[in-house]
Image (cartoon, rainbow, N blue to C red):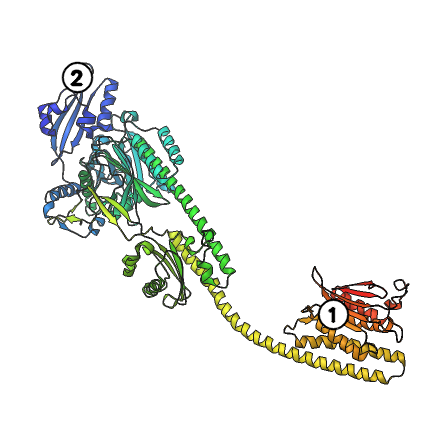
Amino acid sequence: MVFYSAAESRISGRSAEAVVGRDFFRDVAPCTNLPAFRGRFLEGVRRGALDGCLHFTFGFAPRPIQVEVRLLQAREPDRYWIVVRPVGTVPPSRHRFAAEAAFEAVARRARAEPVDPSLCEREPIHLTGAVQPHAVMLACDPGQPDLPVRACSDNAADALGGAGPGSVVGRPLAHVLPENLVTSIREALAAGALTDPARPLRHLVRLGSREAPFLTAVHFYDGRLVVELERVPERPEDFDAATPLQAQDAVSRLRAAGSLAQAATVVAREVRAMTGFERVLVYRFDPEWNGEAIAEDRAADWGQSLLGLRFPASDIPAQARALYTKSPARFVVDRDAVPAAVRGQPTMANESVDLSFAQSRALSPVHLEYQRNLGVNGSMSLSILVEGALWGLVIGHHRRPHYVTPETRALAGLVTDGFALRIHELESQRLWAEQQHSLSARNALLARVAASEDLVVALTSGDGRGGRVTLADLFGAGGAAMVAGGRVASVGATPPPDAILGLVDWLRRSLPAGERVFATGQLSEHYASAAAWPAKASGLLAVLVDGEAEESDHALLWFRPEVASTVVWGGDPRKPVLADAATGTVLPRRSFERWVEERRGRAEPWAPWQVGTAGVFAATMEGVVLRQVRRIAELGVEREALTRALEQQKVLAREIDHRVKNSLQIVAGVMRLQGRTVADPAARTAFEDTYARVMSVARVHDSLQQSADMESVDLGETLRRLCGDLEAGVAGAAQRLEVEADPGLTVPSQTAVALSLVATELVTNALKYAYGPGEPGRVEVSARSRPNGGVAVRVCDFGRGLPSDWATRPRSGGGGLGMRVIRAMLERIGAELEVGSAKGPGTCFTVLA
């Protein structure tokens, strides 16, 4: 700029010396750096015919000024005139009155009074009744076929060929806008394409005698069809518009970011490069809706950094967050620009057009005053929506008015959406890893519980080296405990057992009916006694198990230690919200100086999935394990009854064995007496053989009766008694039999019966056939343990030996009765019979069992 008149100096308050030599549009009057002003100027310069007139409003404080602007070609080459002529003051509007009230209230801040913070949340910021002056808004009635205009912003004349609200309101939309655009709107309405107000119908149209390009955005909401018209530049590059390649590169860098911090740094840097804002922040909400600047990219000469600072939830109240969720992009070109009031028909005097989804909606005076206190003029807010929920914002700040083209705004929104997807991806990966670890720990615990008789020990005992999971490993807690029937078992860092019992008792009394899960990262705020254990139990996740809360006999508890932290706020969050006592106007805070808060008694919060998993795990314990415990108790009672019954059975079995033994002995005695009276030698021999067999069975029953174990028999003792019976019942046996056995050689009762019968047969055969009548000789019986397990029973004589054709001699029917008994018994116990000779003459039979 080479010339600045004195009249302009009086209007703007700037001296000629301060502005001559500087760029008019960027430095002197950046509020004019718009397509309707600078864009029109550049178009005329390129055509070589700069000759135009436009109306503009400078938002000078305290009173804005409306001016007529003439753009003229000077006589000198490459020289141009911008002639400004004041034409009047700004017409009154509801939004303007509110702004003036806020401005005046700020001057009376010293007399302001604290008010309920919810007053901010009740401010109707979606019903501002005005739009930003770089856009024109029409509100139509979609219920009428001709879509009549019911309201119009008061800056419509420049866009609509000089037609102001008075000549637009009440007319059919087709009389105001091009027919092809109105046809597209009707078709979209009929097809239901406007049901989602967050996805407007967009068209590029040319309006007015100059056919200036306008971007239209049409949406339907709250019974009104809202049409926004925004003048756009003929050449977006005149306003440093971003390109799709920039957005593509930004998204690629986001995908390569390996952490949330890296991704946030990338998005702050890339969005600032695309939009040209002097500072771009990534702002994250915490669960209480306080905000934190987790990334920042700013101009070198912007002194104060907001990185790492926290901001109270009242800075962005609930209704503002709701709008950010509905309409995820908000750009303010000029904080001090005079908004265009929305004027409607007389019948709409008590109605306001809901501008929740209007992209050009004017911001509330309180919001604008907040930006003024922060030293910000142009601004940007892009919502970071993760799975439909408001996670945070990408915020742009500029110290002067700052225009961003629609193309750039869309690409910046696209990059922000890419950042939201990357957040979801990184968070999903982190949660998946945590949940997999928790699932592995849970499976290991359940497997151990299923194999253990002691539930408490199974959940809380480790191997001391970290190789065996415990209850604490389920959620990465510092310690865990289980309470069962007044018994406390803990692992890791936990409060003392008495303190845990007191905590569980408090939970039983405090939890509402039907609730059994309690989770907090600040236990001492709920349970005062916990202030004594900050290093062990600042955080608690607890589940009452088995029955209603007040009746629960079991509880699972996980503890987390205090994480002492220093939180740096952008201003003291404890200061109250103030309002002007005269007007009730809410006053935004002015101080953003660093304010440090030392936080104690807080632990890392429990994730929602951890709280849910704790409930499921407890339900598993209740539904399976605790029922198993009760079943074990029932089985214990049944076992005692069975033990008593078994003892009675043993007594009965001994009694039966005693009676069987006595009966067999009686039978054997009768047979022996009978055999002595028989004259026939063959019959007498048969009686003796039968006597021996009956006594062998009787001796086994006798051994069972005397054994402490009903299933085992002392084989050596049984054979001694058996041979003693044979000495008494078989002629000549007393002088011949010798018995040897390993002490304590026991065999199952079934084996003992079989071996006793086999030994009886072999001994009686040796006594009868090994020696001639009157010939002296002995018969040796032995029972030994085998080296590889089992027993060996041998019956040896030293007599005449077996006949030479014994092995090949034909045996009708498989041999005599004695051999048939032997074979049957050997087959029954799976034993083998070996036949050989002793040292010298004679024969040895060896049974290997």
Residue 740, numbered label: 1
- Residue 722 in picture, x, y percent from top left: 75, 75
Q: Say which amino acid is labelled 2.
A: Ala
Above or below residue 780? Residue 308 is above
User: Which quadrant of the rendered structure holds the N terminus?
Assistant: top left
Taking 653 as reference, is 205 left or right? left
Q: Is residue 373 visible?
A: yes
Circle 2 crowding by C-alpha within 10 Å: few under 14, some 14–19, many from 20: few
- Residue 716 in picture, x, y percent from top left: 71, 71
Q: What residue is drawn where x is 22% and y is 23%? A: 41
Front in this rendered view, residue 831 or 370? 831
Taking 291 as reference, is 576 left or right? left
User: Which quadrant of the rendered structure holds the C terminus?
Assistant: bottom right
Q: Is residue 344 visible?
A: no
> Mark 2 or mark 1, which is nearer to you?
1
Above or below residue 98? Residue 254 is above
Q: What residue is drawn where x is 32% and y is 44%? A: 391
Do residues under tags 2 and 1 come within 8 Å of each other at their CB atoms?
Answer: no
Which secondary structure, mark 1?
A: strand
